[in-house]
Image: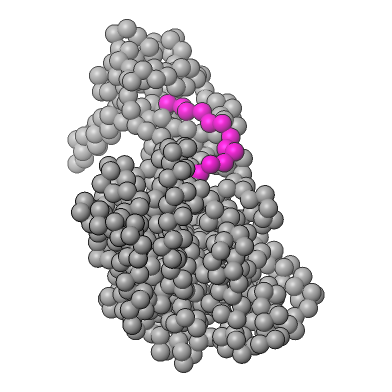
Amino acid sequence: MPIAFCVHILVYKMVCKRVYGQTIKEWLTAYQNNSQQPEGAIAALYAEINAVAQTASQDVAWTLLFEWEDIERQLTSLAKMRDDVGIDALPLYGVPFAIKDNIDFAGQTTTAACPAFAYEAQATAEAVNTLINAGAILIGKTNLDQFATGLVGTRSPFGVVPNTFNDQYISGGSSSGSASVVARGLVPFALGTDTAGSGRVPAGFNNIVGLKPTKGAFSTRGVVPACRTLDCVSVFSLNTEDAWTVYSAMAVLDEKDPFSREIPARLPLHVLPQRPKLGIPMQSEWYGDKTAEKAWKQSLQHFEKMGVELVPLDFTPLHDTAKLLYAGPWVTERFSVIQNLLNKAPEEINSVVRDIIAPASEMTALEVFHAEYQRAALKRKADALIASVDALLVPTTPTIHRIDDVERDPIALNSQLGLYTNFVNLLDWCALALPAGMRDDALPFGITLIAPAWQDYALAEFGMRWQKQTPWTRGATGKALGTEPSTLVMPRHKQDPTVRVAVVGAHLTGMPLNFQLTTREAVLVESTHTAACYRLYALANTTPPKPGLVKRQDGSAIEIEIWEMPLHRFGEFVAEIPAPLGIGTLELADGRTVKSFICEPWAIDGATDITALGGWRAFIKQLSEKKTETSGSSAP
């Protein structure tokens, strides 16, 4: 090892703790506190990973661990970026990560888990560039099912990647190596790819988060295609906030990628309601796995405790869509990638992968168009289905298999794992796979949230709620997640201007007119108080009951909520406000001003002054108690 490398490790070990299992936030906090620096922390992490990779029990999760000199060049570049723009402009400053070995990094070999296909990348994939420009440090490339064809993690000449909890079981694929290195805490996040579930199934099997973005949100330029029209780069992480931090850095339009899509200019500031409706399968298939079925039912109980309304739905249109992925002509996209190799040296391709892809050579353009017409018709039904609820909730997989069982029956057992994943990209939806506790056999169980395109933020925000409700350990490390609250920041995009509105009465969360905010894509920003110069009145003869807020010198601080809505929805919201209410400017306790409901002074005559109660909720509670007392006293 170079002398500089050894010095970095010596200094790091004198002042720092072990770096395994740290979240992105913990890496950043340590840098901010000067308790670690990138050169020393990355050197120590690299030494620990390299020590395992060089032993007889080589870590098959890696296909390539970079030479230290390659990493040192990145650290030198990072130091220059820090000096040029400052750490605050680098949201992933000094955070190590890995990428699936079907994603290019300039100067390094891309294999797609097929040595005969391997080539030296001339340029870095744009998705990786966005992370490096955000300050992240790439340390290596990870194993996968060959050509990203499989959900098992066993179809690789570099070795079978085992489950991180029990090495007799599969890790899931095709992004097996990326999931493994995250679950074991070697890196806080890694990139996979997802066409049929490859970024979700390994997350479910290894107790980590798998974010499958809206198709086109991340550039796929520089990624070996599986099905180019469906492919997504995906994110594995230890917790929800880390996955979203990476999403925020990567969700950038790539003008050179024809399949890249810009986040819509009028992206709704959408989150799931506090008591959302989640659609679940009306009939669930477990392939005889009673342990998985039990874990699913336990998960549903946790969701119900969160106030979720579970709505059984007929998933037939979704399953019919899924059948198109491999039984239909989309497999010809996979064929187009390996056609030359298949013609020249078919023996160099994994036999299972070859058997899946080779028949595509017989498919015709006519079959492609017929299948696309069928997909479009199914999507119309599927969109109507998902529109009936706030999101879908499914088991990430219906079962898990032992490695030796998959080796004996590779096609059928693999196909079982895609029951709740294969349809998502064909329908242009997004998904978030989350841990959901442990099965009775000590293997992880996972659930997945699914929503229409561009509702990635809504899924992540609800994922944070699930994480707080049922906190999991960090992958297979045994370390608990931190409980410190985190805030998810919207990604960079051309978002419409917004306006903040303070509400004081019937529009508060849980009150009868709150829907007028939520249906206009408004998001609750904070609960706070007015300045101490307002009086609150219960207006007479209003349905539902409404308050009037009037500015007075003898006033008090009144409890309020502040909501943010897109400016283009504000006009229709204001149009629904009846006299004597209107919109004016409200002063907050901290001196800020926002738009708010105000009341015309004439309406105060005959109204009840409820200022002393401090807010509308207290008044409604008082009314309810009086009603209960009256009802009780009139009982026989």
Question: Which residue is at a point 47% across and 48% down the rendered structure image?
Answer: 77
Quadrant in the picture for the C terminus: top left
Residue 138 appears in which quarter of the rendering? bottom left
The colour scheme used to paint the residues is one colour
- The outermost residue toward the bottom is 408
Residue 203 appears in which quarter of the rendering? bottom left
Quadrant in the picture for the N terminus: bottom left
Asked if residue 634 lies left or right of residue 437, the reply is left
Question: Which residue is at a point 75% across and 73% down the rendered structure image?
Answer: 368
Rendered location of residue 561, percent (x, y) = 38, 30
Q: Nearer the viewer, residue 405 or 86?
A: 86
Asked if residue 46 lies left or right of residue 111, the reply is left
Asked if residue 280 lies left or right of residue 13, the reply is right
Residue 8 appears in which quarter of the rendering? bottom left
Question: Which residue is at a point 33% across and 20% down the rendered structure image?
Answer: 590
Q: Nearer the viewer, residue 310 or 129?
A: 129
Give the vertical position of 327 relative to 64 (above or below): below
Q: Is residue 87 visible?
A: yes
Q: Nearer the viewer, residue 12 or 420?
A: 12
Rendered location of residue 605, percent (x, y) = 39, 10
Give the vertical position of 56 relative to 382 (above or below): below
How many marks on residues? 0
Rendered location of residue 455, percent (x, y) = 52, 50
Question: Which residue is at a point 44% across and 61% down the rendered structure image?
Answer: 69
- The outermost residue toward the right is 366
Q: Is residue 272 visible?
A: no
Q: Magenta stretch containing residue 217, yes or no?
A: no
Rendered location of residue 183, percent (x, y) = 35, 66
Q: Magenta stretch containing residue 498, yes or no?
A: yes
What residue range appears in magenta?
491-502
- The outermost residue toward the front is 3
